[in-house]
Image (cartoon, rainbow, N blue to C red):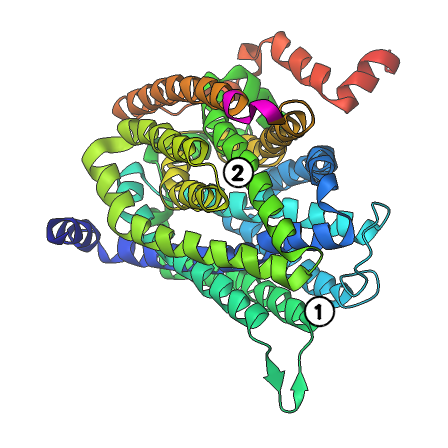
Amino acid sequence: MGSIVSRWFGSFSGMSKDDRLQIFMMGVVFFFVVAAYTVAREFKDSVFMTIVGRTYIPDAKFASMFVLIPLILLYSKLVDKTRRYQLLCIYSTIYGVLGLVFTYFLGTNIGIVNTVQDPHRIFGWLFYFFIEGYSPFVLSVFWAFANSITSPGLAKRGYGFMIALSKLGGALTSGFAWFLLHKKFSLGATTLSDVAIHQIILGASSLLLLCVPVVTICLMKAVPGYKLHGYEAAYKFEKARGKAGEAKTGAWSGLKMFFRYPYILGIFSMLFFYELFNMVLNYQRLGIAEAVYGNNVSGITGFLFQQMFATHLIGFFISLFGTSVLLNWLGERTCLLLIPITTAILISFFLFSYSPTSIIIAYVGIRSINYAFSYPVRESLYIPTVKEMKFKSKSWIDAFGTKFAKSTGQVFNKFVQKYCMNFFFGVHAIFFSVAIGVWLVSAFLLGRRYQKAIMANEVIGEDFASKKNEPESVDNVVKAITIMGWFKSKFGR
């Protein structure tokens, strides 16, 4: 343990003063982002289950994919028109303000005051879609910003510390929420209701999110500009494009690059398989919560926050003493392979020891590893890419791609629930084995491509700026899978 600690502190102390300041301030920004997201994410399921019903969660997951498409197109337009840090300020402000609006309505009859489950209660659906957009429009924007101003070497040394600060934020807010929900909190002679406690927690998280623009602006002023170039080859390429007037590539460019470059497809696969396993375990976890607490929203929410507190606490120690050490020692290529391997171990434990305890242990373990280790490893893959990949392709992956993965997991859950409960172990074993196998192959190829790009000082996607190099088939694929493209091909001639 002593050598691990000394190695971690050695890598951090080896940075320059400006590098340490940059990592620290990015960590503070991420602290607020994750502290707010932790509360919002767990409220999403408990509020929706109380207002609409657990059986409609798969439908909400599927519908959210299409609800977010126009918002992604708007975001892609903003990428062309605003600076990197401004995007983070804009979206964190929007979500902070909207969070306060939802906080107010949560305490009215359209919110959780009314506990009658009904799929026609619009507020439950709107709240669910609002929280689903948090990942692509706040969390994803933060990472796109961080990857654009961080070099590969600094990411190896500093991302672990940054993640540790975020886990501390998540642990504090989830622990605070868990405490309030299990201890009847009083103001003088008045005991706060469950509804009021939910409003306090959601309102506090929204206020934390409004701190993000303040710290981000301070970061941009405190750190010298030349230290915020990130991957130098990508910075020079983007600067040259800007001078040539080629910086604006349109709202659909991120999706086009997804189909043109296998590298982006590989990053998507890393996220897809995690979310697939996460959804299968989460459905089992929500079943335990519903069986124990019924329609008691405070009981369900407290149960979920208890696990999130454990997730962030475990993740804090993983990120503090494991992430940077492993990245420096093994490199991204090997670390990418460790992700599916550790997931396979936890999934095997879940299957062979199937019980409420094993479900929760596997769920907490997989999420702890994802947030503390997999996330920084996966996000660092965007560093040697062009702006369109960092921001636009990433937004499609984190919005549409993530929801597609979650919907796939929910479809599997429904299929097993309806047809295969008598063959639960066999069906899950086959499903997980195939997914892990494909995941391992994808991680191997992706790691090899990343290593090749860094060694050659290559910018992945730099040829996309040339219109003559863009194959017509890419446009056809995009049109074929989008509603807008379908209508255009049918009626636009």
Instruction: Give the residue displayed 62% in from the left and 30% down from the top.
Output: 413
Q: Which residues are magenta?
A: 422-426
Q: Is residue 91 magenta?
A: no
Looking at the image, how many numbered discs can be counted on the residues? 2
Label drawn at residue 281: 2
Q: Secondary structure at mark 1?
A: helix
Q: Is residue 425 magenta?
A: yes
Residue 418: image x %, image y %?
69, 27
The residue under label 1 is which amino acid type? Val
Q: Earlier in the sequence, mark 2 or mark 1?
A: 1
Tell me if 234 is positioned left or right of 7 in this view.
right
Read off the residue under disc 1: 195
Q: Nearer the viewer, residue 143 or 334?
A: 334
Q: Please tell me in which quadrant of the rendered image residue 450 appears.
A: top left
Quick check: can you spot residue 91?
Answer: no
Tell me if 451 is positioned left or right of 7 in this view.
right
Callout 2 crowding tier (Cα within 10 Å): few <14, some 14–19, many ≥20 = many
Residue 283: image x %, image y %?
60, 39
Callouts 2 and 1 close, C-beta under 8 Å: no
Instruction: Give the residue displayed 40% in from the left and 30% down from the top.
Output: 348
Label drawn at residue 123: none
